[in-house]
Image: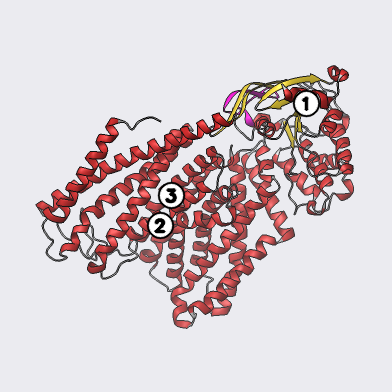
Amino acid sequence: MEPKPIALKVLDIISVILLGTATYLALVFAPTEAVMGQVQRVFYFHVGTAWVGLLGFLLAAAAGIIYLVKKDVKWDIIEVASVEISLVFFLITIMLGSIWARPVWNTWWTWDPRLTTAAITELIYIAYFMLREGIEDPDRRARFGAVYTILGGVSAPITFMSIRLFRTIHPVVIGSQSAAAQGGFSMTGGMKVAFFFALFTFTVIFIDLFWHRIRLGTLAAKVEQLKLNIMN
Amino acid sequence: MITVKKLVKRFGMKTVLRGVDLEVQPGEFVALLGPNGAGKTTFLRILASLSRPSLGEVRVAGYRLPGEAAAVRANLGVVSHLPLLYGDLTAEENLRFYGRMYNISNIEFRISEVLEMVGLENRRRDLVRTFSRGMQQRLAIGRAVIHDPEVMLFDEPYTGLDQDASSMLDEVLRSVAAQGRTVVMTSHDLARAEDLATRFDILSRGIITASVTRNNLKKTSLPAFYKQALAN
Amino acid sequence: MNDRPLTINQTLSIVRRPSPNFLKATFAVVWKDLAAEFRSRELFSAMLVFSLLVILIFNFALELDIKTRQSVTSGVLWVTFAFAGTLGLNRSMSVEKDRGCLDGLLLAPVDRAAIYFGKVISNLVFMLIVEAIVLPVYSFLYNINLFQPGLLLVVLLGSIGYVTVGTLLASMAVQTRTRDVLLPILLFPVAVPVLIASVKASGGFLTSADFASEIMPWINLLIVYDVIFTAIAFMVFDYVVEE
């Protein structure tokens, strides 16, 4: 087996350090928000993980298109890696969001565009894995997976828009704020540091995990190949 | 009529065909024999344009696959172990549907002609669902020749037929389907293959290991030849 | 090429032309589906009986009294259509897969997209027929007038979007091991926008909401969805049936 590349080892260590620092910034360094209190600190990681989830979602759809054009297994591995990571991070986003929503909105869950879209995206991902599970032929599995990520990639934004046609209560912290949103606030200097640092941290963690997952996918393919060589 | 050079087919990492070379002259009837899992069906599906070759050159009726698939399909008839017929349509309606898909002119006349050839003119208005397996298979042959193709492919046409139905099918295959056409047939029924074919090719582990024409087979029997070819 | 001996009854009667045009092939598929269905009425009766049962269950589950009726009718109708739709789509593609007919279609020298659109049109016809029966029955049972031109337009647009995506996903689902259960799981999360927009637009018509502000956006959304997904399905269908 190939040893783990040095660069990847370094990235692992950097990720851990960054995560520690980001945690410190979010939980200690950033000032406490006046109205919501301590629970607002969830926000930094909430947005960080949401950003990474979205990144994985977009990467998956792009990898799906490229796979159909090029038919190169590499893109299938990238697609699966993106979907898997995105699935987990969206789940974390939803859980952190619920923790925050309980005191602020007075409910764990509400059918707001973002929440609903996140939930449906998770369902699309689960359907994606069930689809792949049901197919033996690896080429067909990759092709159907690619088609489904494309359908999901187009449908999720439309879902978001369509639910947005209802009135939303999700706060928009960056950019314009709708009057009905509850729980909005404006960021002070210390908050901004914690916020952007969290975004940066999760991007690095994403790259690290992505790298690991692609390496795992490639190794799995190699194992498959070796198995076949032995059998023949 | 059919030229295959260094054909390789992989499913994911599993190589099913590993460099098949085959040349079929116009009017030849080639029986492709081999044990289960040798890649016979895969090979036939590639000739039928249903599956893409991974590597190598395939020409059927003068057209290249997969590039000129539409032209190949217009000149190709396929009889498989499944009838490829709709149970809720009558014999005549099934043929009419396929006639339209092949864009043949004078369609009603051709339907009567084909039904007469396969001996089903009395049952033309009966639902295919009510047909016996043997009758379905005869109608399947009618379906395959409706557009008068130059090349015929038979994929295990005897599967699921009893002795009587098999000999009846023999007759129809010989007189209707094979007459004046180039044929490739896969089968593991050596006796039937010996009756019909003019050449016998043995496909084993993804390559053609032996080939003999009917005339050269005179000295030895087909089963003996088959056993010997597989032993090598 | 044609140097083989000709037998008179085989060859003189037909003249082979290159390949049928797109529309001709599409309608051959539609004709085939409708003829088979007209004969057996399997798919249609299953969809219809199922729809009526769903409405019956909703009747008890939701206590459809006069007050609630106003607000939940559009939801009940679309849930019914969606469920009956999956039933029909699954069946319509299983028929192709079971006797190897899908291979038969793919062996024909026609554009694969023509096969796809043929299946879409026949699935749409089945769904519209079921809807054409369910709507008056519902009107009769609950004394609500569902025959408003606007509402019928929404039913048409919603069904088109649902069937477009559904046919594509059903042709994927029948090629998997878990084909019986997979279609709704694949289809529902992707079809959410159609369902939301259809429910909202139908509800708007039933409660006589303001057309420009409360109904039009949803109809626009339906049109956008229909166009986008027809285009995507047209582009990717080849990848779903090739090997």
Name the side, left or right, on which B131 lies relative to B50: right
Name the side, left or right, on which A20 lies relative to C241: left
Residue C65: % across, % down: 48, 82
| Chain ID at mark 2 | A
B232 lies above or below A162? above
Residue C80: % across, % down: 54, 67
C78 lies above or below C221? below
Q: Quadrant of the N terminus of chain B?
A: top right
- The crowd level at tag 1 (other Cα within 10 Å; few <14, some 14-19, many 20+) is few
Q: Nearer the viewer, residue C76 or A98?
A: A98
Residue B197: % across, % down: 82, 27
Residue stretch in magenta: B54-69
Where is mark 2, residue-wise? A120
Name the side, left or right, on which A35 lies relative to B163: left
Same chain check for tags 3 and 1: no
Determine which of the numbered discs, if any, sits on residue B227 in the image: 1
How far is the residue under mark 3 from the one under mark 1? 53 Å
Q: Secondary structure at mark 1?
A: helix
Where is mark 3, residue-wise? A152
Q: Secondary structure at mark 2?
A: helix
Q: Is residue B153 visible?
A: yes
| Chain ID at mark 3 | A
How far is the residue under mark 1 from the one under mark 2? 59 Å
| Chain ID at mark 1 | B
Seen at 66% across and 35% down, the residue is C109
Question: At label 1, which amino acid type do we have?
Answer: Lys
